Amino acid sequence: MNVLVFVGIHTLLAIALNLLLGYAGQISLGHAAFFGLGAYSSGILTATYSWNPWLAMLVTASVVASVAFVIGFPILKLKGHYLAMATLGLGIIVYILFNEWVDVTGGPSGFSGIPNLQIGSLIFDTDFKNYYLIWIFVLGCVLLSVNLANSRIGRAFRAIHDAETAARVMGVNARLLKVQVFALSAMICSIAGSLYAHVMTFIAPPSFGFNISIELLTMVVIGGLGSIYGSFLGALLLTTLPEFLRFMNDYDIVFYGGLLMVMTIFMPGGLVRGIPQLFRKIRGSGKDKGNANA
Amino acid sequence: MLRLKNINTYYGKVHALKNVSLHLAEGEIVTLIGANGAGKTTVLNSISGITPPSAGDLLFLKETIKNLSPDRIVKLGISQVPEGRQVFKPMTVDENLELGAYLRYKARAPRLEIDKDKEEIFQLFPRLEERRKQAAGTMSGGEQQMLAIGRAMMARPKLLLLDEPSMGLAPLVVQEIFRVLQRLRDERGVTILLVEQNAKAALKLADRGYVLETGKVILEGKADELLENSEVKRAYLGKDKKEIWER
């Protein structure tokens, strides 16, 4: 059950990154930063300052979205490798902040005593309850994202992705839209971070480091760029896989690397497009055999 | 209708346009010819706001559009068919056309009206209708060019900017596309600024022309006069080369 809670949180994060990367075509190697900002801000506001967790989540999400909006303007002017580097830098800065600002964040030893979420007398303190809590958020996020992706705005994102100049001369305000999707993406990550903090009640910097940003990227690519359902598949696979790879100890990273290589070579469209193709191929070859026999 | 007054545009330190002035009257087809790197595309991008000019003035319908963003300029009625077509390859023909009407969707224009415009585009280019559910990237170059023009028309422009629509296309396809441009002007009164390498075809279609060389306008005049101009003939139409070489 615990694993399914994490699948849910990772799905939220993967969808957030996919809106940015898969739809609008803008890479971010620092998305764990927004996840961490959500978690730490919620944690500190509730544990240190005794705020209501829901209020803290809401305030945190809006602040993180605004911050992303403001830094989005200079950052998203960059393209390709430069954008990757800038977002990477953002991730590292935030990670260092969590580690070094010991008085507020607890530094490397982490931050504990975060309360669980609560509605009336219902306290989300077991895996079972958290499971429902998280998946309600995931459901909401999926509905929002699917609607957005199929709207005029979603089409504009894909247009920017494919031919930015052409999109601009169609009247798409590319710069503003890119910044807006960046802010939306950051906001979803922040909410996922708040949920994570309240579910875990303890957070530490390594959960929001560079490798997490990369893991998110892997989920999005393996699941399928530009597919909301693909993000779910990617999150599911990469979250449950470690459970099955325990026997490999530290060598599981080799498996991930191999998986990423195999996937990009044989299923460049990700699981969500690759699996149906595979089925068709198998069925197709089966048919051929049938014909040969006849 | 459109007037460029001493436009200067830079790419970083490169001075791409030097005091370019030109004008278009309503309902005119004007062509801008010149060699590679002369600055033809930059003129169009300066008008549409993609590479805003740093000095000079740009007037459209008597109002300055110099510091407006590309989306505002589209809204005023200027659509660009970008160089190399730039259709949205993974999207269908239908979706491409709908993106052309992006600002109209945004302004909540009635769907029926937009669908009717789409039908009109299909009348101009029947081949697009056959392929409306097909991904744009899988079509031929000529069909993609037709789509790029159709997409620009979906914004209901008063002025259409075309960047080398003949690029890499078979002569027959070029003819077909140029015929449609003529129809757009004659039947709908769309004013057209046509940038071309194919100087002969462009001058035959246009009313007037400008010749651009290394960022400057070096010649301007009626299209038929430019066709007869010895300098244009030599440099852009490939005629009378011999005499000049031997002199």
Image: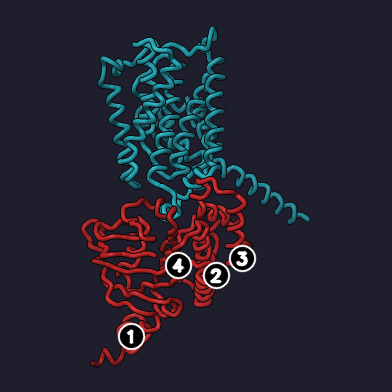
**Circle 3 residue:** B123
Answer above or below: position of B34 versus A29.
below
* Tag 1 subunit: B
Instruction: Check residue B187 in the rendering and tell me which mark sits there, or answer none.
Output: 2
Q: Farthest front residue?
A: B62
**Quarter of the image where one finds residue B131:** bottom right
Q: Which tag is nearer the camera, tag 2 or tag 1?
A: 2
**Circle 4 residue:** B191
Q: Amino acid at mark 3?
A: Gln
Q: Earlier in the sequence, mark 3 or mark 1?
A: 3
Asked if residue B127 can be seen in this view, the reply is yes
* Picture colour scheme: by chain
Q: Secondary structure at mark 1?
A: loop
In this view, the residue in front, B48 or A228, is B48
Q: Farthest top residue?
A: A121
Count of labels in the image: 4
Q: Which tag is nearer the camera, tag 3 or tag 4?
A: 4
Question: Is disc 1 surrounded by few (<14), some (14 to 19) or many (20+) residues within 10 Å?
Answer: few
Q: Which chain is cyan?
A: A
* Tag 2 subunit: B
**Quarter of the image where one finds residue B122:** bottom right
In this view, the residue in front, A238 or A106, is A106
> For the residues marked 3 and 1, what is the alpha-carbon distance in whole angstroms?
38 Å
Question: Is disc 4 surrounded by few (<14), some (14 to 19) or many (20+) residues within 10 Å?
Answer: many
* Tag 3 subunit: B
Callouts 3 and 4 on one subunit:
yes
Asked if residue B173 can be seen in this view, the reply is no
Q: Amino acid at mark 4?
A: Thr
**Circle 1 residue:** B229
Answer above or below: position of B68 versus B121.
above
Callouts 3 and 1 on one subunit:
yes
> For the residues marked 3 and 4, what is the alpha-carbon distance in whole angstroms?
20 Å
